[in-house]
């Protein structure tokens, strides 16, 4: 019995996974490289690359010892997954429910890393709500909800991370009154996320910090960062099989004070 316990201890593996809306990989490349190395990140999900695949700085990331998979788009959107471990691509688009096809916006990656199913998402902003942008967001959420329902039924170890562009509750923003009638805070938008959570996925941050009020995004305007007028819209959703492995999670806020920062900061979790 003692031998078995020692064996398990010696073979215990920890894994640190992060997600970061970089708001242009070209502008924030040095931030990303420094974060990967100094924070000992094993897997990093990136959103809003704002570049096509051919213009992604593969060499600079791979020279640090990482593998990279990119779903890029010129000037807009774009997602990537960076990993110390081999990456197997499952899908680079969220299929339309009606025809199963790609809609042309680079907002989604579904991959297998080790025995984890890891999905990187960059949800549409959706503003203003009186326009087709809002309808596109609702449609995208409907498709994501359908995808998550099928995925959950596989009983795999699932991690869904990225910029959700959804303020879940009042505690997730500095002043709820400011966000009334905003596409990030409407009941229709929040209800789609609730439905995904009702399947059995959990918000990793709220497992560890059920009552903390921290943010992952601060607008560039009106001194939002200096006043701490932020919102928490970057999330990790975990299936129960991964939630059982969760050791810690947090928001890497100090990067927002660096020169030329993104308006988002990385979120991270550690699995044992």
Image (cartoon, rainbow, N blue to C red):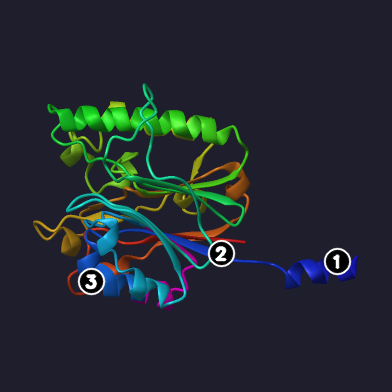
Q: Badge 2 local density, few (<14 within 10 Å), some, or many (20+)?
A: some
Image: 3 above or below 131: below
Viewer-side residue, 107 vs 243: 107
User: According to the image, label 1 marks what residue?
Assistant: 4
The image quadrant where one finds the C terminus is: bottom right
Question: How many circles with numbers are drawn on the protein?
Answer: 3
- Give the residue pinned by disc 3: 257
Dot 1 or dot 2: first in sequence order is 1
- Which residues fall within the magenta stretch? 34-45
Out of 86 and 119, give the one closest to the viewer. Answer: 86
Whether 40 is among the magenta residues is yes
Q: Which residue is drawn at 11% across and 61% down?
A: 223
Q: Where is residue 230 in the image (x, y as percent from the top left)?
A: 24, 53
Q: How far apart are marks 1 and 2 (CA)?
A: 22 Å
Q: Say which label, 3 or 1, has the lower sequence index.
A: 1
When asked about the image quadrant of residue 228, the answer is bottom left
- Residue projecting furthest to the top: 98
Residue at left offset 48%, top offset 34%: 148
Residue 42 appears in the figure: yes
Question: Dividing the picture into quarters, in which one does residue 91 lie?
Answer: top left
Compared to 260, does 109 lie above or below? above
Q: Which residue lies furthest to the front in this view?
A: 54
Residue bearing mark 2: 15
In this rendering, position of residue 169 left or right of residue 76 = right
The foreground one among 135 and 244 is 135
Residue located farthest toward the right when viewing the structure as drawn? 1
The label nearer to you, 3 versus 2, is 2
Secondary structure at numbered mark 3: helix
Question: Is residue 86 depicted above or below 74 in this figure?
Answer: below
């Amino acid at each position: 019995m003692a031998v078995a316990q020692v064996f398990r201890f010696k073979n215990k593996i920890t894994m640190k996974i992060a997600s970061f809306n970089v708001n242009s990989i070209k502008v924030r490349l040095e931030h990303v490289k420094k974060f990967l190395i100094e924070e000992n990140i094993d897997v990093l999900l990136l959103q809003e690359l704002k570049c096509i695949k051919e213009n992604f700085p593969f060499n600079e990331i791979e020279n640090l010892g990482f593998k990279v998979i990119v779903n890029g788009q010129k000037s807009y959107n774009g997602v990537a997954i960076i990993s110390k471990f081999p990456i197997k691509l499952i899908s680079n688009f969220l299929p339309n429910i009606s025809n199963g096809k790609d809609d042309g916006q680079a907002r989604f990656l579904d991959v297998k890393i080790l025995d984890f199913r890891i999905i990187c998402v960059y949800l549409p902003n959706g503003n203003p709500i009186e326009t087709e942008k809002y309808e596109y967001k609702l449609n995208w959420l409907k498709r994501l909800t359908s995808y998550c329902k099928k995925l959950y039924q596989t009983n795999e170890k699932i991690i869904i991370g990225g910029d959700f562009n959804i303020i879940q509750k009042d505690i997730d923003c500095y002043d709820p009154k400011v966000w009334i009638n905003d596409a990030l805070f409407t009941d229709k938008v929040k209800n789609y996320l609730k439905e995904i959570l009702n399947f059995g996925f959990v918000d990793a941050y709220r497992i560890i910090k059920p009552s903390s009020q921290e943010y992952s995004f601060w607008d560039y305007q009106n001194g939002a960062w200096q006043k701490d007028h932020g919102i928490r819209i970057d999330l990790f959703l975990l299936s129960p099989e991964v939630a059982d492995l969760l050791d810690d999670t947090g928001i890497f806020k100090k990067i927002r004070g660096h020169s030329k920062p993104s308006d988002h900061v990385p979120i991270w979790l550690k699995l044992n």
